[in-house]
Image: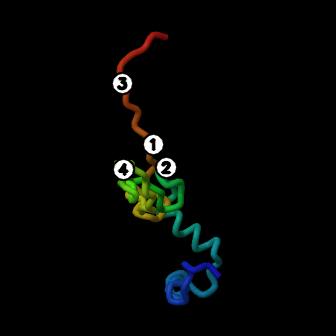
Amino acid sequence: MHEEFNILKIKQLQHLFGEDATLSEVLKQLQSERPFECPVCKGVGHYTQEYPHPNEHGGGDWGYITKTVQCKLCDGTGYTKVKYVPKMKQVGWEEA
C-alpha cells in the first residue's frame, strides 16, 4: 500500500462522503471546489527547488541542495479555485 494512505483519513473521508461513495465521486466533488490544475506544481502540490550551498570539501566551490517545497499558489493541493496564467512582462524592444 501507499505510505500516504492511513486508516484514520480514509474513515474520515468515508464519514464525510458516505460509505457508498466511489473514489470517482469523491474526486469529482473535491475538484468541483478547485477545478483548475496549478500551473506552478502541475497538479502535484509540491515542487523541487535548488538552493546554493557551499561545498563541504572547502575550496570556495558551491554546490546545490535540492528540497521539496509545498506549492504556495495552491496550498499543496495541486489545484486552484481560479485559473492562473503567467504574467507577461515586456522587457525592451527588438527589431522584427
- Residue 39: assigned label: 2
Indicate the amino acid at tag 1.
Answer: Val
> Pointers 4 and 1 in contact (CB under 8 A)?
no
Indicate the amino acid at tag 2.
Answer: Pro
Tell me the SS state at disc 2. Answer: loop
Q: Earlier in the sequence, mark 3 or mark 4?
A: 4
Which residue in the protein does label 4 denote? 59
Q: Which of marks 2 and 1 is nearer the N terminus?
A: 2
Give the percent coordinates (x, y) of residue 35.
51, 58
Residue shown at 45% from the left, 42% from the top: 85
Indicate the amino acid at tag 3.
Answer: Val
Tell me the SS state at disc 1. Answer: loop
**Spatial separation of the CA atoms under disc 2 and disc 4:** 39 Å
Q: Which of marks 3 and 2 is nearer the N terminus?
A: 2
Give the percent coordinates (x, y) of residue 90.
37, 26
**Spatial separation of the CA atoms under disc 2 and disc 1:** 7 Å
Mark nearer the viewer, 3 or 2: 3
> Pointers 2 and 1 in contact (CB under 8 A)?
yes
User: Residue 82 versus residue 1: which sits nearer the camera?
Assistant: 1
Q: Residues within 10 Å of mark 4 (few under 14, many from 20)?
A: few
Mark nearer the viewer, 4 or 1: 4
Which residue in the protein does label 1 denote? 85
**Spatial separation of the CA atoms under disc 4 and disc 1:** 43 Å
Q: How crowded is mark 3: few (under 14 residues within 10 Å), some or many (20 or more)?
A: few
Which residue in the protein does label 3 denote? 91
Q: Residues within 10 Å of mark 1 (few under 14, many from 20)?
A: few
- Residue 22: assigned label: none
Residue shown at 61% from the left, 72% from the top: 25
Q: Is residue 21 above or below residue 24?
A: below
